[in-house]
């Protein structure tokens, strides 16, 4: 049997492939973005797409499942919110082809705006929930989830946290199974979800969960692991095991590292729980603890079933739970007398904040907006980094596409209070197609013609923050993509008469155009046209600074471009700017904002393309 080192994402993709999976859909979002990219490697045997948003991705998966095809839909935890509308109805229907929803969760919020626990949503939607704790489990549970889905006629959620998605471990590979497509049932009562068809579906949905709950106690992914003793166990630990720890996912492996004197009940399926097996088991212990990240989901389920236990009394409700944190909780619970895990010594280092890439086309836009000292409302994307220093200028970041609705709400409220002011919203092309178009259309409803509102669409042709996936506009930048939607034409068709396109690397022209729209009384839309420098591998001859001309004003540094730093030159007392030629991609913005033409492209005799800044 072949064994390969895989990430959790790669392993889940492999499990889908080996299980005879046929159709996969997703929307890019960490920590699960690599899952669909891994599935794409198995084409043409499978079809995989990044859909325009999570709701559409789920609907694509539903359609495939209706035909009897085994289907996987993946998204990050907050993406499930977008997909909840079809999901809540789909779970009532009888599943034909196995349907697996992979929810990538982010304890500690490494790349997310919150750390919501989708086990709660899975239960709410009446889905079985599997919790993978390793790459091997990600593969095995993906295969199991598809089988359970067909056996019980329900969608199944596979929960994977960031650590599981991105960490690597050995995975046993198998052959692809043949899976026959059953065909689409055209009986209206099966999938036509309107009354009276919906009423019996409620009972059928509940019966599926009840039947699975009855079988859960006998399932081998839920098992007891008795402590066998260990010579390296912490001194002072009790000789007789009196504590049972119920856990799942990665927490099982973190707990095992401690070699604590406890018996462990490992849950592979966290909903529905094997309640009857646990009710009988806990009678043998003086203390029952529940170890889980985020919300007390398992703990609450057990307590609702009359099983006494404690969890969040000793373990944090937020963030990741590392071994030292688990050990501290066991000490507090009286399982261990002292903590033995050495906490890594913190080393003082110079902090490096997140920033735009070299040559990022968003940078000149925010430089222009900051100089105009105007309120800017943000959204989800690379441009979210403008909330940080040194730009520090986005007043709001809530969710995908929210900036446009927030723009309207703030405008109306300020107008009614007699405190109107110019407002600007920024949104990327990927986010605009994801969930911004409806908000944009809503701007036209009861629009105040005197309201000074500007919507800036940062069209870089990619979903850059999640790894450079294509968007509906990418076809205008590369022939490798089949979608070339024109945002200006789309907006004009929606009824927006004033749409201005700007090349933000022509700094002076872009500055003049944006400032004109900021002063315009009414609603105006500006769309930038430069593509993502990283995704489209833009590289022009680099720029250099003449320290004899540079006055050290830091105009170039304030654009927050990584190659630009202040440097001490030999024979010059004052710090002057310097550009790292290895990082510079030649976008020319620094040269254009320089007021004294001290920056020029290497090899050029003329300095400061554009003749220097007019500031």
Image: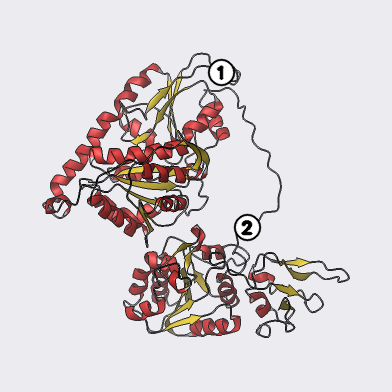
Residue that lies at the very extreme toward the right in this rendered image: 571
Q: How did the renderer colour the structure?
A: secondary structure
Q: Is residue 296 visible?
A: no
Picture quarter with the C terminus: bottom right
User: In the image, what residue occupies the spot 33% across and 80% down?
Assistant: 493
Q: Is residue 2 visible?
A: yes
Q: Residues within 10 Å of mark 1 (few under 14, many from 20)?
A: few
User: In the image, what residue occupies the spot 21% across and 40% down?
Assistant: 206
Nearer to us in this view, 243 or 38:
38
Nearer to us in this view, 420 or 33:
33
Question: From what the image shows, is residue 261 above or below residue 26?
Answer: above
Left or right relative to 310: residue 214: left
Left or right relative to 460: residue 436: left
Q: Residues within 10 Å of mark 2 (few under 14, many from 20)?
A: few
N-terminal of the pair, mark 1 or mark 2, is 1
User: In the image, what residue occupies the spot 45% across and 55% down?
Assistant: 29
Picture quarter with the N terminus: top left
| Mark identifier at residue 353 | 2
Place of residue 376 in the rendered image (x, y in percent of width and height, measured from the top left): 51, 71
Residue tagged 1: 230
Q: Are marks 1 and 2 in contact (CB under 8 Å)?
A: no
Q: Nearer the viewer, mark 1 or mark 2?
A: 1
Nearer to us in this view, 539 or 389:
539
Q: Secondary structure at mark 1?
A: loop
Question: From what the image shows, is residue 300 above or below residue 224?
Answer: below
> In whole angstroms, how far apart are the C-alphas of marks 1 and 2?
44 Å
Q: Secondary structure at mark 2?
A: loop
- The image quadrant of residue 416 is bottom left
Place of residue 156 in the rendered image (x, y in percent of width and height, measured from the top left): 31, 43
């Amino acid at each position: 049997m072949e064994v390969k080192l895989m990430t959790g994402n790669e392993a889940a993709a492999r499990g889908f492939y080996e299980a005879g999976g046929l159709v996969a859909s997703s929307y890019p979002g960490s920590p699960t973005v690599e899952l669909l990219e891994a599935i794409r490697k198995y084409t043409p045997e499978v079809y995989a797409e990044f859909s325009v948003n999570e709701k559409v991705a789920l609907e694509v998966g539903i359609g495939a499942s209706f035909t009897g095809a085994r289907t996987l839909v993946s998204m990050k935890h907050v993406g499930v919110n977008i997909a909840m509308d079809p999901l809540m109805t789909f779970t009532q229907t009888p599943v034909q082809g196995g349907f697996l929803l992979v929810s990538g969760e982010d304890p500690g919020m490494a790349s997310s705006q919150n750390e919501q626990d989708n086990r709660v949503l899975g239960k709410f939607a009446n889905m079985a929930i599997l919790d993978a704790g390793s790459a091997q489990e990600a593969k095995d549970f993906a295969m199991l989830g598809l089988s359970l889905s067909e056996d019980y006629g329900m969608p199944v959620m596979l929960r994977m946290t960031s650590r599981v998605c991105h960490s690597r471990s050995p995975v046993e590979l198998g052959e692809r199974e043949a899976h026959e497509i059953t065909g689409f049932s055209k009986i209206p009562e099966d999938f036509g979800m309107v009354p009276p068809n919906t009423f019996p579906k409620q009972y059928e949905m509940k019966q599926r969960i009840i039947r699975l709950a009855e079988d859960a106690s006998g399932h081998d992914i839920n098992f007891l692991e008795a402590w066998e003793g260990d010579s390296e166990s912490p001194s002072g630990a009790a000789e007789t095991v009196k504590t049972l720890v119920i856990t799942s996912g990665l927490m099982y492996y973190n707990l095992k590292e401690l070699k604590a004197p406890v018996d462990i009940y490992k849950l592979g399926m966290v909903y529905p729980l094997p309640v009857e097996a646990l009710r009988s088991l806990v009678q043998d212990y003086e203390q029952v603890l529940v170890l889980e990240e985020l919300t007390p989901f398992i703990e609450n389920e057990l307590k609702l079933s009359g099983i006494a236990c404690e969890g969040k009394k000793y373990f944090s409700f937020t963030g990741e739970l590392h071994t030292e944190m688990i050990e501290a909780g066991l000490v507090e619970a009286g399982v261990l007398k002292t903590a033995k895990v050495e906490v890594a010594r913190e080393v003082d280092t110079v902090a490096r904040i997140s920033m735009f890439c070299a040559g990022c086309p968003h940078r000149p836009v925010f430089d222009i907006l900051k100089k105009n000292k105007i309120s800017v409302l943000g959204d989800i994307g690379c441009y979210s980094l403008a909330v940080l220093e040194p730009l520090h200028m986005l007043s709001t970041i809530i969710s995908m596409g929210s900036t446009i609705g927030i723009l309207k709400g703030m405008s109306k409220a300020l107008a009614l209070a007699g405190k109107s002011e110019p407002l600007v919203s920024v949104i990327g092309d990927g986010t605009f197609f994801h969930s911004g178009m409806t908000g944009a259309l809503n701007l036209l409803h009861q629009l105040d013609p005197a309201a000074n509102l500007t919507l800036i669409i940062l069209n870089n042709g990619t979903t850059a923050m999640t790894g450079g996936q294509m968007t509906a506009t990418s076809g205008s930048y590369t022939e490798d993509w089949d979608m070339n939607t024109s945002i200006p034409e789309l907006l004009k068709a929606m009824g927006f008469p004033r749409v201005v396109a700007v090349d933000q690397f022509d700094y002076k022209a872009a500055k003049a155009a944006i400032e004109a729209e900021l002063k315009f009384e009414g609603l105006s839309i500006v769309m930038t046209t430069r593509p993502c420098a990283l995704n489209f591998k833009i590289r022009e001859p680099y720029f250099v600074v003449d320290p004899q001309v540079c006055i050290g004003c830091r105009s170039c540094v304030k654009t927050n471009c990584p190659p630009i730093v202040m440097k001490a030159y030999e024979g010059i007392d004052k710090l002057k700017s310097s550009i790292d030629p290895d990082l510079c991609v030649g976008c020319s913005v620094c040269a254009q904002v320089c007021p004294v033409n001290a920056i020029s492209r290497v090899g050029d005799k003329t300095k400061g393309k554009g003749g220097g800044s007019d500031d």
